[in-house]
Amino acid sequence: MDDFIIIGGGIAGVSAGARLSQLGTVTLLEAEGALAYHASGRSAAVFEQSYGAPSVVELNRASRQFHETANGGVLSPRGLLIVARKGQEDTLAQDLVDMRLDRVTADEALALVPILNLKNFAGAGYHADAWDIDTDLLIQNFARDIRANGKVVSGAKVTKITRLPDRWEVTTPKGVFAARSLVNAAGAWADQIAALAGIPPIGIQPYRRSMARIPAPGGRDVTTWPLFMGAGESWYAKPDAGALIVSPAEADPMDAHDAWADDMVLAEGLARYEEMVTEPVNRMITNWAGLRSFAPDRNLVIGPAPEDADFLWCAGQGGYGFQTSPAASQLLADLVTGTTPALDQAIVATLSPTRFA
C-alpha cells in the first residue's frame, strides 16, 4: 500500500505528486497514454505574475523563485503588450492597473509588434515582466521526482473508488491501487472523481478555450515579439516555434471531455485579432482547444476535504495551473504535514475546500 494515490497527470497532479513524494510513496494514475494530455498540454505556457484573481497572484508570487531557479529554471523572456481599439479606452485603463503595465505610445507598441494597425489603435500598455514557461521541462522535472519514490501509471482511467477503514482502493484497467490518502487532481473531471469517492462535488466547471496556430505574419521573424492581447483579454496572440498562436480567449462552459475548437468561435476571435493588425489571416496551420476548470468562486481548491481528511483536493486551477504549481503543490504538502504554510493564512482559507462545506 502506498502513502498517496494521485488521480490526474496534468500539472496539478504531477506537481502535487512531486511534493508528496518527499513525504511518502506515490502512485500517480493518468487516464490517457501520456502526462499533460488535456488542459496542461494545451496551455499558452506563460508566467505573468499579475494575472489572475488575488489568491492566484499570491500563488504566482510564491512560485516565482522556483520557476526561476529549480533544476536550472524553466522561464525565458517574453513580455506582455495589451492593445486597445477605439472605444476600449476605459477597459485598457483598468488593464493597466490590474496587470501593472506601463502605458506606451503607438510608436513604442509598433516597435514591439510591427504589424499593429494604428488606424484602429486607441492605446497600449506593456511590461517586460512576462515569461515563457518550458511546460514540458516542468512536467518532466516533477515526474522525475515522483518516480524517485513511486510510479506513474498511464492508461489508468479510474472506474471505481472504495473507502476502507485504513485506505482508499482505486480500480483501473491497470489494476487496483491502494493508498492511505487520495489526491483529486483530475482537472475537468475533479467533481466526477469526488462523486466516485463518496465526497460531495463542489461545482468544478470546465470552460473551453480555443487556439489557432497561424503562419508568422508576412513571413516575419516573430521570435522576440511579446505576447500581445486585446484589452479586456478579448483575444491574444503569442509567438510559438516560428509561428503565432492566436486565441479568441473564450470561456464557454462545457462538460468534461477531450475538447476541440469551435470553428465559429475561432473565426470570431481571429476577426477581433485582425482588427488590430495589418496582416490578414489567410490560413491556419492547426487548431485545438483545452478546458480550463474553475471552482464557483474562481479560486483554486487545495487541501483536505472536510468530509474526509485523507481525500485531498488539488483542483480548480483554471488557466493558472503551470504558473501557480510550485506554490500550490507546496501548500498541499504543508497541509498534509501540519506545517504552517508560507502563504498568508487568509489566502490559505480562500483556497481551502472547507469554504464549500
Image (tube, rainbow, N blue to C red):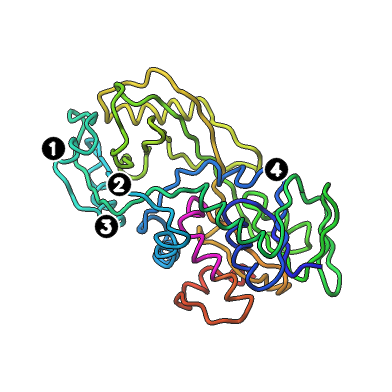
Whole-percent x, y for residue 334 in the image: 57, 76
**Majority secondary structure in the magenta region:** helix
N-term-proximal mark, 4 vs 2: 4
The local secondary structure at tag 4 comes to: loop
Label 4, label 1: how far apart the Cα atoms are: 47 Å
For label 4, the residue is: 32
Q: Are marks 4 and 1 in contact (CB under 8 Å)?
A: no
Q: Quadrant of residue 72?
A: bottom left
Q: Are marks 2 and 3 in contact (CB under 8 Å)?
A: no
The local secondary structure at tag 1 comes to: helix
User: Any mark on residue 100, and which?
Assistant: 3
Magenta-drawn segment: 318-330
User: Any mark on residue 80, and which?
Assistant: 2
Number of other residues with Cα within 10 Å of mark 1, as a class: few under 14, some 14 to 19, many 20 or more: few
The residue at the point 29 percent across, 21 percent down is 218
The local secondary structure at tag 3 comes to: loop
Q: Nearer the viewer, mark 3 or mark 4?
A: 4
